Amino acid sequence: MRSFESELDSLKASALHRSLRPLKGPQHCQILSGTRELRNFSSNDYLGLAASDVVRAMLADAVEKYGAGSGASRLVCGDLEPHRMLESQLAKLKGTDAAIAFSSGYAAAVGTVSALVRKGDVVILDKLCHASLIDGARLSGATVRVFPHNHLEKLERLLDSSVASAGPEGRVLVVAESVYSMDGDWADLFGIVRLTQAAGALLLLDEAHAFGVFGKNGRGLADKFGLARKVDFHLGTFSKAVGLSGGYVCGSKAGMDIILNRARSFIYSTAPPPAIAAAAHDVITRVFPGAMGERRRADLWNNVSIFTKAMAEAGAPLLHEPTSAIIPVILGENDRALAAAAKLEEAGVLVPAIRYPTVPQGQARLRITLSAIHEEKDIVALARAVAKI
Ligand SMILES: *Cc1c(COP(=O)(O)O)cnc(C)c1O
């Protein structure tokens, strides 16, 4: 039997071994790693809500009201008021008939995709889709097809053959993200919507990195483009811009009923803590649509342009104008990305090195994420340190 040690050694030899970094204190733009304070450019807390006074207060009030755990799966006896309030508010915000909340975005993606298609159906994914979507597709038993990132001609060909192979009773599901998590670029949404509709297929859009960040009241990128109604299933998370944890899917009543009856990550998992659901409800009701959400989104875009300008001034202009809060610096080999991240850490900046299989082989990178609460001087210091690399 092969030993765990030899397996670990081979991960280490290819600079693919991962380990945890113990941090102290709350998730904020300054964090304590051991005894060192680092400026944190690694989190998906885009609006800086995770440790904010406002969300702390929402959560504390909800714990007072609803207690800690939820006791059981929603279908057993865990269907508490905050979950239903969260779902109806989310459906209202997203303009859909219904919504379902999950305990994480991962659970939402795996559960939803595997509930919507089965053997004989076809699921077509963009090559850069998140692991949770790929896992859901594999688990479903449907035929899995992949098109190169945003490659519309290939998608069109796959749609043609998939519609034929699924037959009149079969389903064809196209899966894309709106903002890609490791590149920060956008899906070609107009093209994907046009082709999916023309083929009579279903479209699932994962807005994990766009929810709270784009569109009216933070509804997402599909809303920004006026395409929200053309998307059948809107997926997302409460773990990123919302600053909490949990995941969701929104869509038609019948679609949500199928997911409730078939998504095993929903059926066989204890409901999220009611206080988390209540606080998520409060954030999407009182922060995303209000003055605070508007201001934080404006601050985030301002910080993205401060970084872009500072990189140009430091003599290392970005290859592409950023279109989101995620800015990759692609370095190629795994050890190069690790060495670059270590250099940045010496300079007091935390930026993760992202390697295979999170990104394709040969595309290891630094993944910089900006937040509304970063300060200008820290962003300029980051740009100078990155430019040196
Ligand atoms: C982060 C992410 C998820 C998972 O969400 P969690 O709430 O962190 O489990 C799903 N899809 C995409 C595209 C993501 O980036």
Image (cartoon, rainbow, N blue to C red):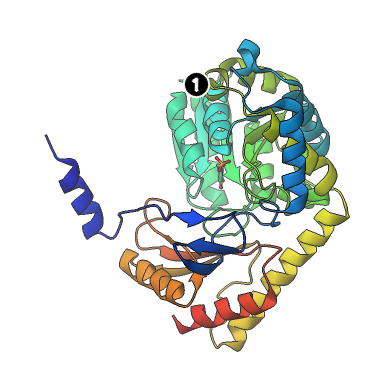
Q: Name the one closer to the observer, 175 or 145.
A: 175
Image quadrant assignment for residue 247: top right
Judging by the rendered image, the residue that carries numbered circle 1 is: 118
Q: Name the one closer to the observer, 67 or 339.
A: 67
Residue 378 in view: yes
Q: Name the one closer to the observer, 171 or 341.
A: 341
Q: x and y percent of residue 125 in the render? A: 51, 41
Q: x and y percent of residue 23 in the render? A: 48, 56
Residue in the image at 72% along x and 20% along y: 80
Image quadrant assignment for residue 78: top right
Q: x and y percent of residue 297 in the render? A: 77, 60
Residue furthest out toward the top: 76
Q: In this view, does 378 lie above or below 17?
A: below
Ligand 1 has an atom within 8 Å of the beta carbon of the residue at disc 1: no
Looking at the image, residue 256 sits to the left or right of residue 96; the answer is left
Q: Which three-letter amino acid code belongs to the residue tagged 1? A: Arg
Residue 225 in view: no
Identify the image quadrant of the N terminus: top left
Residue in the image at 25% along x and 53% along y: 11
Image quadrant assignment for residue 31: bottom right
Q: x and y percent of residue 380 in the render? A: 62, 80
Residue furthest out toward the left: 1
Tag 1 secondary structure: loop
